[in-house]
Image: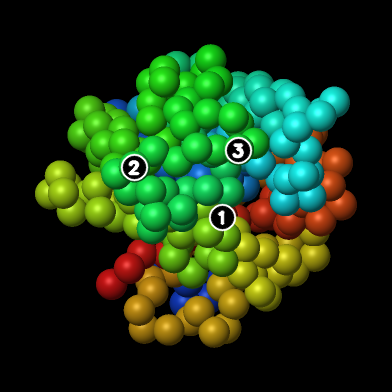
Amino acid sequence: MIPQKALISKLLKRSQPNLPLIPEPKPQTSILVLVAHPDDECLSSFGYLGRGLAVGAKVKVVIATLGEWSEAYSYLSSGSLKNFFLQLGKKRAKEALSAAAVIGLKKQDIVFLDYPGGQLQTLLNKNWSLPLYSKYLRSDRTVFDSAFEKQAVFSGEKLFELIKKIIFEFKPDVLITHSPLDVHKDHKTVYWLVKDSLEALKLNPETYFFIVHNRGFSFSGKNALSNRLFPAKRFMAQNYNWRSFELTKQEQKIKNQSMLKYKTQLKNPYLNVLLKSFCKQNELFYQEK
């Protein structure tokens, strides 16, 4: 076994030139990850979270929706497949728990808010105070048993309240969430809700942002464990401090095993390539200046 100092030194040499490393997680550090859908937490930071757990950090993952909505199946709101979305949501919650267990997270470390996937931006822009009736869930409040708060109303104000509550109670030292550079509307909405929550609470944890969907970024490099994630050239601006977190081969293997738990996603050829494109030698984040 390679001594810890020698291993870290080896990883440092492997890092991209001029791309600083994210600091190592420390014992008793509180790490909070806030994401839009199951699998976002895995592809973004399961290497970092796994090492954090290994040294005794406290980790909590909050998932805003179960990702049950699919544009490809959006016409299935009634008829013989009227329960399609409900069943998909339940499957994705189970997959998230299975993936989390691979790196050592327990059920109580995962919080499902269970808001309607694909509709978070609507809550922010149109249904801040008035409840949104989700046609495909046939409800204006949470319906899944996994929900952090049963019967929580689908409004931007209520979702904001829940996120603030979790952040306030957990008081993270490190917070990881989506980037506004991400083109997915749910991802952007989570970014703004988290940012506004921190401002309202007057908290300033070490905050790192990650991108999933953006041209030239998600599929950077070949989909192989021997390749790396790099920032797209157009993102190498002065506004962003990019950080790399280097994974050991064992951490890469474990992250890949976690990703394989998302069977519903991997059935889709596009998502299969997308998810696997994040299982590389490093994880990539940036901080806002």
Distance CA(mark 2)–CA(mark 1): 39 Å
Q: Is residue 56 left or right of residue 97?
A: left
Q: What residue type is labelled 1?
A: Glu
* Residue at x 33% of width, y 68% of height: 288
Counting from the top left corner in percent of width and height, residue 69 is at 66, 41
Q: Which of marks 1 and 3 is nearer the N terminus?
A: 3
Q: Which amino acid does label 2 sit on?
A: Leu
- Could you say whether the residue bearing mark 1 is in a helix, strand or loop? strand
Task: Read off the residue under disc 2.
Answer: 130
Q: Earlier in the sequence, mark 2 or mark 1?
A: 2
* Residue at x 36% of width, y 83% of height: 238
Task: Read off the residue under disc 3.
Answer: 135
Which is more foreground, mark 1 or mark 3? Answer: 3
Counting from the top left corner in percent of width and height, residue 162 is at 31, 33
- Residue 79 placement: quadrant: top right
* Residue at x 26% of width, y 37% of height: 161
